[in-house]
């Protein structure tokens, strides 16, 4: 029987520990990478799909701008101000106008506010605008001009689908990878 030296044991322990540590790190990194791809993909696909569905299947009606809703918006600025040396400070408030749009759904009249605010009216009172709402849900209406671009949403849908597909493929490769059998050498 051979006697092991201390340096041989230390070297053997270091090599085995390094292999074990790198193996665990690799497994954790692969799983974290798959999870990150999956989360990014879902966060790209779900909003894009909802927007595309809303734009494609929504009911489009004509609405009329009946007024402007005035709000005051604060302007947060950073840097030195008169009463503070540095840091965030609230600047003067500015007037913001949102269009108030009225449209009909059957016999009912509904009103919505535009999402976009501006110092000057974006839509003149009395002008016609297209309003989109989910079938049977006029309370979820939005101005068609304020919906995100369809092609941009389709691009996000494509990117998200690619990321989800890559995560599933990566997981499939890991699940099919053969497990290494532990080989024990017989002592002579």
Image (tube, rainbow, N blue to C red):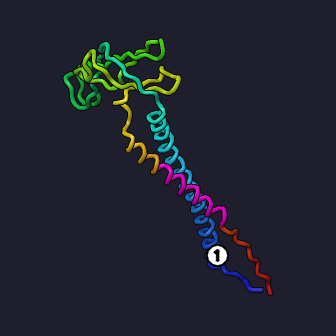
User: Residue extending furthest left?
Assistant: 82
| Percent of width and height locating residue 170 | 57, 60
Question: In this figure, what is the number of numbered marks?
Answer: 1
Q: Magenta: predominant secondary structure element?
A: helix
- Toward the viewer: 91 or 57? 57
- Toward the viewer: 58 or 163? 58
Quarter of the view holding residue 77: top left
| Screen quadrant of the C terminus | bottom right
Within-10-Å neighbours for mark 1: few <14, some 14–19, many 20+: few
User: Residue extending furthest bottom?
Assistant: 188
| Screen quadrant of the N terminus | bottom right
- Decide if residue 135 is in sight here: yes
| Percent of width and height locating residue 149 | 36, 39
Range shown magenta = 159-176
- Toward the viewer: 2 or 178? 178
User: Residue extending furthest front?
Assistant: 106
| Percent of width and height locating residue 80 | 21, 29
Residue drawn where x is 55% and y is 55% of the image: 167
Residue drawn where x is 74% and y is 77% of the image: 183
| Percent of width and height locating residue 61 | 40, 23
Residue drawn where x is 32% and y is 26% of the image: 116
Quarter of the view holding residue 96: top left
Q: Secondary structure at mark 1?
A: helix
Vertical order, 84 against 168 (above or below): above
- In the image, residue 162 lies in the stretch drawn in magenta: yes
* Left or right of residue 45, residue 67 in this image: left
* Left or right of residue 70, residue 19 in this image: right
- Decide if residue 90 is in sight here: no
Label 1 sits on residue: 12
- In the image, residue 154 lies in the stretch drawn in magenta: no
Residue drawn where x is 46% and y is 36% of the image: 56
């Amino acid at each position: 029987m051979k006697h092991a030296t201390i340096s041989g044991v230390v070297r053997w322990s270091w090599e085995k520990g390094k292999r074990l540590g790198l193996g665990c790190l690799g497994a954790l990194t692969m799983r974290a990478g798959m999870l990150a791809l999956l989360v990014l993909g879902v966060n790209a696909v779900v909003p894009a799909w909802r927007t595309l569905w809303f734009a494609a299947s929504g009911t489009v009606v004509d609405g009329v701008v009946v007024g402007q809703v005035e709000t005051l918006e604060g302007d947060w600025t950073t840097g030195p101000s008169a009463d503070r040396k540095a840091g965030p400070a609230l600047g003067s408030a500015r007037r913001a106008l949102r269009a108030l749009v009225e449209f009909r759904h059957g016999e009912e009249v509904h009103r919505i506010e535009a999402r976009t605010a501006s110092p000057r009216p974006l839509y003149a009172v009395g002008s016609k605008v297209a309003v989109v709402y989910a079938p049977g849900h006029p309370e979820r209406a939005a101005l068609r001009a304020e919906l995100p671009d369809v092609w941009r949403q389709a691009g996000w849908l494509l990117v998200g689908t690619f990321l989800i597909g890559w995560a599933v493929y990566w997981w499939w490769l890991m699940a099919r990878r053969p497990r290494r059998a532990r080989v024990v050498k017989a002592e002579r």
